[in-house]
Image: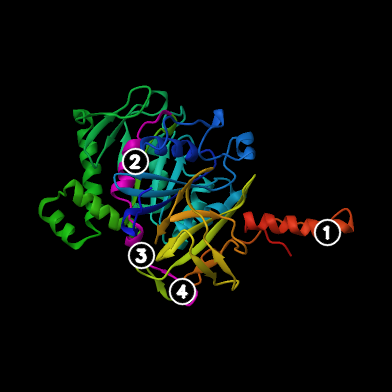
């Protein structure tokens, strides 16, 4: 795989209430990027996400799944998060190591409790948000009502980029007010037919286009001056204004897809690749001493471990983000939290259960490794002359408390070892 620098990398969390279609969207994104020959389906138990037996048995996500796509010289790292509040820790973890939240809404239900919870997490962390209305083919979908709900809950920063000409089983076309074109899909989805906007929709589309142009212009003084003079921006100028608005959370774009039929996903991929901010365009993070840390390949090597998984025949798989510098296969690093030495014997980029070996990863990138001796979720490993420590993730207090004991006193030690292992995989567990 090509080595990407921080100005080629984008990190995105897929969030949304349970059953909003995140795993199905994952399949479409991988397919459109050329990473899959065909889309998997949850019912066929062959998706890149939801690859653990428990997920395939119940048909929904339990664990956060990291995957990546390469698109036009850029690398997009994405994390598909479970929607159930039972697994809130996975969503919070993903948000702390990604830069943008793609927040899905089920077209049949609109703004749900999970939508609001996930948005609050993005608000607390200052992360950009893109709303994505999915399942537009559902018979109970009312896009205008969903858009009204979004505006009522989140205010005038909510700005639609697209709207469907029909919802329910008849859905097959959108008006895109950046492109100012009508996009129509055949029954099998895929690439749309791009046409001029019908005369009867032109007034509505022009009004939405003007609102989007104005929202984009507000984020850049030179764009605002041009808007006052001409009331127009080029497509590239709109992209730049929207990108700046995403970073400052002054604009929440709304997109439309039907991931189950692969309609609208290719256009969404274009927006993610062209507009969503790169890691070096986001505000700098701070270490535990309050010092700013830039995602700079020329800086000292510092790696933050945000997730531990356990897989059969492999053991612990530990996922990390490169916070600074470059980590190479074979690097000897020091655990800033535990004082131990570790060798990064193998480096991988991952897509679900599939791992591809790489020789190095640069600042801002996400990868995984195996066979570390003494690394726990939340630990930081540093290269020479680097003393960074990161303590990003603050989980909510537990909702349930239980006292347990081993049936046989002799098994107490085994029970504690099992509980410790569970906490390694899910830090929302508190064992006292």
Residue identifier under label 2: 268
Q: Distance between the residues labelled 1 and 2?
A: 52 Å
**Is residue 36 rendered to the left or right of residue 206?**
right
Q: What SS does tag 3 mark? A: loop
Looking at the image, can residue 4 be seen? yes
Residue 291 lies, in percent from the top left, at 42, 76
Residue at 18% over, 58% down: 224
Viewport quadrant of the C terminus: bottom right
Secondary structure of the residue carrying tag 1 is helix
Task: Find numbered disc 4 in the image and state the secondary structure of the residue it sits on.
Answer: loop
Q: Look at the image and give the residue range highlighted in magenta.
A: 261-289
Q: Which quarter of the figure has residue 122?
A: bottom left
Residue at horizontal 47%, vertical 70%?
383
Q: Within 10 Å of the Cα at label 2, are there few (<14), some (14-19), or many (20+) other Cα atoms? A: some
N-terminal of the two: label 4 or label 2? 2
- Provide the residue designation for mark 4: 384
Spatial separation of the CA atoms under disc 2 and disc 3: 29 Å
Earlier sequence position, callout 1 versus callout 3: 3
**Tag nearer the camera, 4 or 1:** 4
Q: Distance between the residues labelled 1 and 3?
A: 47 Å
In the picture shown, does residue 271 fall above or below 226? Answer: above
Q: Earlier in the sequence, mark 4 or mark 3?
A: 3
Residue appearing at x 34%, y 68% in the figure: 298
Numbered tag placed on residue 412 in the rendering: 1
Q: Where is residue 131 in the image (x, y as percent from the top left)?
A: 40, 46
Tell me the CA gap for discs 4 and 3.
15 Å
Indicate yes or no whether the magenta region holds residue 2. Answer: no
Cα distance, mark 4 to mark 2?
41 Å
**Element type at marker 2?**
helix
Q: Which mark is residue 131?
A: none
Q: Residue 297 carries which label?
A: 3
């Amino acid at each position: 795989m090509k080595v990407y620098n921080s100005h080629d990398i984008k990190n995105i969390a897929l969030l949304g209430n349970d059953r909003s279609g995140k795993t199905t969207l994952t399949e479409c994104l991988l397919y459109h990027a050329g990473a899959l020959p065909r889309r998997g389906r949850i019912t066929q138990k062959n998706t890149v996400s939801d690859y653990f037996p428990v997920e395939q048995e119940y048909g929904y996500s339990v664990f956060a799944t990291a995957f990546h796509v390469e698109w036009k010289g850029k690398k997009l790292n994405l994390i598909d998060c479970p929607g159930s509040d039972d697994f809130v820790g996975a969503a919070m973890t993903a948000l702390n190591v990604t830069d943008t939240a793609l927040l899905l809404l089920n077209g049949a239900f609109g703004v749900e409790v999970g939508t609001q919870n996930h948005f609050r997490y993005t608000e607390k962390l200052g992360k950009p948000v893109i709303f994505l209305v999915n399942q537009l083919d559902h018979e109970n979908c009312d896009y205008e009502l969903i858009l009204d709900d979004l505006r009522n809950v989140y205010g005038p920063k909510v700005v639609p980029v697209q709207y469907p000409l029909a919802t329910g089983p008849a859905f097959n076309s959108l008006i895109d007010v950046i492109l100012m074109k009508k996009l129509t899909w055949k029954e099998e989805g895929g690439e749309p037919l791009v046409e001029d906007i019908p005369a009867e929709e032109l007034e509505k589309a022009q009004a939405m286009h003007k609102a989007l142009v104005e929202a984009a212009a507000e984020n850049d003084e030179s764009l605002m001056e041009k808007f006052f003079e001409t009331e127009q921006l080029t497509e590239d100028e709109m992209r730049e204004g929207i990108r700046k608005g995403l970073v400052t959370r002054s604009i929440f774009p709304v997109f439309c897809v039907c991931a189950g039929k692969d309609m609208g996903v290719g256009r969404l991929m274009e927006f993610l690749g062209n507009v969503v901010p790169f890691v070096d365009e986001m505000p700098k993070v701070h270490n535990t001493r309050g010092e700013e840390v830039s995602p700079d390949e020329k800086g000292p090597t510092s790696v933050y471990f945000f997730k531990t998984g356990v897989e059969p025949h492999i053991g612990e798989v530990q996922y990390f983000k490169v916070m600074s510098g470059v980590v190479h296969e074979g690097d000897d690093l020091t655990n800033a939290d535990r004082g131990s030495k570790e060798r990064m014997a193998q480096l991988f980029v991952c897509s679900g259960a599939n791992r591809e070996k790489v020789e190095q990863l640069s600042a801002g990138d996400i990868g995984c490794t195996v066979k570390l001796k003494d690394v726990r979720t939340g630990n930081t490993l540093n290269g020479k002359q680097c003393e960074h420590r990161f303590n990003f993730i603050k989980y909510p207090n537990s909702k349930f408390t239980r006292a347990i004991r081993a049936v046989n006193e002799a098994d107490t030690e085994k029970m504690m070892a099992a509980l410790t292992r569970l906490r390694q995989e899910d830090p929302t567990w508190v064992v006292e």
